[in-house]
């Protein structure tokens, strides 16, 4: 039996058409899809038997797309702060992962992260981690739209011994979940400094054979660029271009250190950027030239990175940060305005994933990935422009309702598919386990 739901908000911010705010309109969804956006009186008349939900203090907008995350690392939040990237990775995070990462760790940590992300309006996550089937199961368990990034490295971990084993496990996991709605897979070579030319060639071939996108950390730090110049004689992006990796199938996470020539290269090859402003600041990685990239025609979305290096999975907070940084970095107060920032967190992220025909904006025929944000709080009044208030003033705590694929996953601030107390109990259990092993 089909279910029709009519949402009656104060505002609809559809993202498409650009810079549009609809007042006095309603959104109608049937099962998993949006079927109409029309004046409220017509919606009430045309769908009298629907489930009508009044959101008269709220704005509706598409769910956020987190374009770069390591969800399971939510269980390592706050373990090693205020460190440089390589110190953080080599001396703290990788040793902790070697001790603790398992199927149970990844499932529990990913579900925990998804609870936080859903509470903050994120409906799609482009993840990158180990134990790919655990990430997929977490997505199915929570209802979050999940892209499982299958990490690939040259060195052994508790998950695989070498690059070939990482790749074979990636294909196995993809085949296992191939027909599951809401879950898809990408190959995720960790970075140019941890993956060989030979492995990159294999990744490109498998990407084409299995129609899988690629997700990789690139130009995150100046040290990465300098080390590549010493080892290969070229900067990492040029090396990857010579290998054939640069295309519209690639999401380059961070891309902090991009010069003018590289920005042109990114635009010409169609590479998408996952901008991680909070993580880049916390690890002092630098300031990505986002405004210059967008002027050149590069598609840029927003990611949180992992909770161990952010430390919040708060895409609304990060899109505000992205907008402010773009203005300061370009010395241009008109750079990345509020509408453009919202697009980065929604439609641009969907485009990077090749899903912009399905999600990322509120249009009839698209999947019903929708969030509602209550703008009646002291922090967002008086309200002259709802888009400006959402981007520059609102907090994730004001997001009250979330739908993914037409399923209501949060109603009036309460998660419907995740037991929050159970998640807190699991987080405390892992905290004690990890803390005991760190101190002994």
Image (spheres, helix red, strand yellow):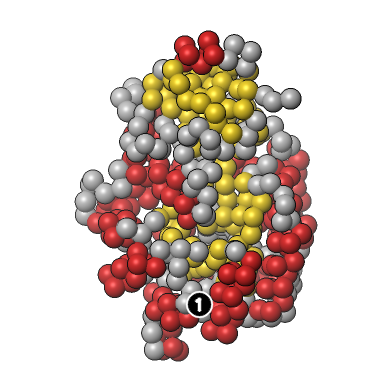
Q: Nearer the viewer, residue 126 or 18?
A: 18
* Residue visible at 47% across and 34% down in the picture: 363
x, y (%) of residue 52? 59, 16
Q: Residues within 10 Å of mark 1 (few under 14, many from 20)?
A: many
- x 63%, y 51%: residue: 146
Number of on-image labels: 1
**Left or right for 349, reference 100:** left
Q: Residue at x 75, y 47 (%)?
A: 426
| Relative image position of residue 206 (x, y in whole percent) | 62, 72
Query: Which percent across, then down, holds residue 224?
Result: 44, 77
| Residue 46 picture location, percent across and down | 54, 14
Q: Tell me if residue 284 can be seen.
A: no
Q: Quadrant of the C terminus?
A: bottom right
Q: Is residue 408 found left or right of 426 in the rendered image? A: left
Q: Nearer the viewer, residue 202 or 232?
A: 202
Q: Is 345 drawn above or below residue 261 in the view shown?
A: above
Mark 1 — residue?
192
Q: Nearer the viewer, residue 28 or 260?
A: 28
In which image quadrant can residue 94 be found? bottom right
Q: Quadrant of residue 260?
A: bottom left
* Quarter occupied by the N terminus: top right
Quick check: 349 above or below 63?
A: below
Q: Residue at x 37, y 36 (%)?
A: 17
Q: Is residue 191 visible?
A: yes
SS of the residue under disc 1? loop
């Amino acid at each position: 039996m089909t279910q029709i739901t009519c949402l009656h908000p104060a505002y609809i911010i559809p993202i498409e058409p650009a810079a549009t705010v609809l007042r006095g309109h309603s959104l109608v969804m049937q099962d998993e899809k949006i079927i109409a956006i029309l004046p409220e009186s017509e919606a009430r008349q045309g769908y009298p038997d629907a489930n009508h939900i009044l959101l008269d203090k709220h704005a509706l907008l598409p769910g956020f797309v987190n374009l770069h995350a390591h969800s399971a690392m939510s269980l390592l939040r706050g373990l090693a702060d205020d460190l440089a990237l390589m110190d953080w990775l080599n001396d703290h995070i990788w040793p902790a992962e070697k001790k603790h990462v398992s199927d149970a760790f990844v499932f529990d940590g990913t579900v925990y992260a998804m609870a936080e992300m859903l509470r903050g309006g994120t409906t799609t996550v482009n993840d990158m981690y180990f134990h790919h089937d655990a990430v997929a199961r977490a997505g199915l368990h929570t209802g979050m739209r999940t892209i499982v990034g299958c990490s690939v490295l040259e060195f052994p971990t508790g998950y695989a011994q070498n690059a070939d084993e990482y790749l074979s496990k990636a294909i196995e996991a993809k085949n296992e979940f191939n027909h599951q709605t809401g879950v898809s897979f990408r190959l995720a070579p960790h970075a140019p400094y941890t993956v060989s030319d030979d492995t990159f060639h294999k990744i490109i071939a498998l990407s084409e054979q299995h129609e899988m996108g690629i997700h990789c950390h690139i130009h995150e730090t100046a040290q990465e660029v300098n080390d590549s110049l010493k080892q290969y004689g070229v900067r990492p992006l040029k090396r990857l271009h010579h290998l054939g990796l640069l295309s519209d199938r690639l999401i380059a996470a961070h891309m902090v250190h991009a010069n003018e020539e590289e920005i042109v290269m990114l635009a010409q090859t169609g590479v998408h950027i996952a901008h991680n402003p909070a993580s880049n600041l916390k690890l002092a990685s630098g300031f990505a030239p986002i405004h210059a990239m967008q002027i050149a025609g590069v598609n840029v979305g927003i990611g949180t990175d992992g909770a161990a290096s952010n430390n919040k999975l708060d895409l609304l907070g990060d899109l505000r940060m992205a907008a402010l940084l773009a203005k300061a970095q370009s010395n241009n107060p008109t750079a990345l305005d509020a509408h453009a920032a919202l697009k980065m967190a929604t439609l641009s992220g969907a485009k990077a994933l090749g899903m912009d025909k399905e999600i990322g904006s509120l249009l009839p025929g698209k999947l019903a990935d929708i969030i509602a944000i209550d703008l009646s709080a002291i922090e967002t009044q008086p309200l002259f422009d709802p888009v400006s208030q959402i981007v520059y003033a609102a907090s994730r705590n004001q997001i009250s309702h979330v739908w993914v694929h037409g399923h209501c996953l949060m109603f009036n601030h309460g998660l419907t598919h995740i037991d929050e107390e159970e998640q807190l109990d699991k987080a405390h259990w892992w905290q004690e386990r990890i803390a005991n092993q760190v101190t002994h």
